[in-house]
Image: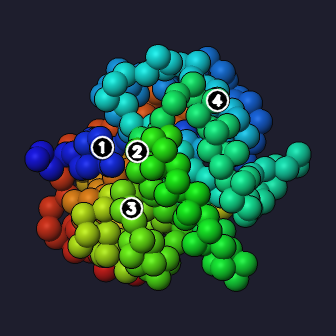
Amino acid sequence: MSSDRFPLGQFTVHRVGFGAMQLPGPGVFGPPRDHGAAIEVLRHAVQAGVDHIDTAQYYGPNVANQLIREALHPYPDNLALVSKLGARRDDTGAWLPIERPADLRADLERNLETLGVDRLAAVNLRVMEGERADALFDEQLDVMIAARDEGLIGGIGLSSITLEHLTRALDRTEIVCVQNPYNLVDRSSQPVLDETARRGVAFVPFFPLGSAFVADNPVLGNAIVTQAAEDLGHTPAQIALAWTLGVAPNVLLIPGTSSVGHLKENLAVADIELDASLRERLDAVI
């Protein structure tokens, strides 16, 4: 198998995909600033070879999925569409948990309807914080297993989880991917990444360039990153993404953007090689 691809359920995808989170308006809420640009970036991504798109019904809400359908339906056979369950938005844009199994199932069906598909490549169960969410984990996993067994999803993923969540889930069923925060300065999910690598499960880091919801970015502003970008003729984002891609062979990137120019820069990281000395200095950032 080529090192630029990795299994994602029944698909084998390029290790640099596309995340739809930045397609809706500010705060991942409401319509995009430029509808035409959002459609263009999606079409350009697929034309450039992207075969893994990550989305969620609560991006907008509804907006990201509607844009994906408008831009790309009918979808290429090799396109792995992956969504998430476990959260919703209220009228003010606040992020709220979906807890009841029936509500999770209803949200899955909304994803399928909005995207215009009978089956998704994978769906991630996003585990919200708190003791109640942890207590509901097994019930929610039941919903995911039933949906997979009915053929509505090709594989089960997990998001924002602990190592204990992962091992509990793997004791019950196959897991095809995990989405957790991970970047140069936040490696709190390292135990989860290590376990997924050991078991051959795709690890999909979100916020690989730092949180999209903070003003000061400790990843892109890191002195080693900025100096390396200058020395190599790349952007700081490209250096940070290339480092993340090289952490383990099961890492799948889903950088998001609403700009074709940024999309091209993101896709180019698959061809950026960081030498051992630079990787060592970046590894030592924390």
Q: Earlier in the sequence, mark 4 or mark 2?
A: 4
Q: CA distance from mark 4 to mark 3?
A: 25 Å
Q: Secondary structure at mark 3?
A: loop
Q: Which residue is mark 2?
A: 154
Residue 57 circle label: none
Q: CA distance from mark 2 to mark 3?
A: 11 Å
Q: Nearer the viewer, residue 8 or 187?
A: 8
Residue 10 circle label: 1
Q: Which residue is mark 3?
A: 175
Q: Position of residue 26 (x, y in %)?
A: 72, 42
Q: Contact, CB < 8 Å: mark 2 with mark 3?
A: no
Q: Contact, CB < 8 Å: mark 2 with mark 1?
A: yes
Is residue 228 positioned above or below 90 on the image?
below
Is residue 121 positioned above or below 127 on the image?
above
Left or right of residue 15: residue 145: right
Left or right of residue 229: residue 96: right
Q: Residue at the location (33% across, 49% down)?
A: 9
Amino acid type of the residue tagged 2 in the rendering:
Gly
